[in-house]
Amino acid sequence: MRVVRLLLLVLGAAATAYGGWLLLPQLGTTLPWLIGGPVLHDVLVAPLVGLVGLALGRLVTNRLRLAWIAAGLMASATLLLIAVPLLWRPPSAPPNPGLPDRNYPLGLVVGLAVLWAAIVLVLVVATAVSRHVTDRRTDRP
C-alpha cells in the first residue's frame, strides 16, 4: 500500500509540474485570476454568505423553509458564478455562429425568476400540506 501511495504522490507531483510548465508562458495574465479568486472569495463572498446565513437563521424559524431558501440561494449563486464571464468581459475570440446571439442578462434574470418561482411554489405547497395535516389532526376526537 505504501508503494501505491508513493507512486500516486510522484504521479501527482509530475502532473502538477507539467501543468505549471504549460502555464508559465501565460503566467502574467493568469496570476491575477489565480490570486484574485481566492482573495475575493475570502474577503467578500464568504463573509457575505455568513451574514446572510445568520440573518436567515434568525428570520426563518421553520427549518424546512430555511433549507429551501438556502438551496435557492446556493443555486442563485451558482447561476451568477456561471454568468460572470458572459456578462463581465467582451468575447476574447471571434464570434461562434449561434452562441453569442443570446441575450445573456435576460437569460440570467429569467433563470433566477424561474428558480425562485419554483421555490416559492414549493414553500406554498408545503405550507398548505402542513396546515391540512395539522387541521386533520385537530379535527379528531
Image (tube, rainbow, N blue to C red):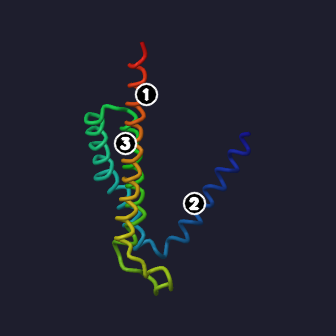
Could you say where residue 69 lies in the image, as x and y percent from the top left? Answer: 36, 44
Could you say where residue 66 lies in the image, as x and y percent from the top left? Answer: 36, 38
Amino acid on which the number 1 mark rests in the picture: Val
Mark 3 Cα-neighbour bin, 10 Å: few <14, some 14–19, many ≥20 = few
The answer to which quarter of the image holds residue 56 is top left
Of residue 15 and residue 91, the one placed in the foreground of this image is 91
Q: Residue at x 73, y 44 (%)?
A: 3
Q: Quadrant of the C terminus?
A: top left
Amino acid on which the number 3 mark rests in the picture: Val
Mark 2 Cα-neighbour bin, 10 Å: few <14, some 14–19, many ≥20 = few
Left or right of 120 in this view: 23: right
Residue 124 marker = 3
Amino acid on which the number 2 mark rests in the picture: Thr
Image depth: mark 2 or mark 1 in front = 1
Image depth: mark 2 or mark 3 in front = 3
Q: Earlier in the sequence, mark 2 or mark 1?
A: 2
- Residue that badge 2 annotates: 16
Q: Residue at x 59, y 66 (%)?
A: 18
Q: CA distance from mark 2 to mark 3?
A: 50 Å
- Residue that badge 1 annotates: 133
Could you say where residue 76 lies in the image, as x and y percent from the top left? Answer: 38, 55
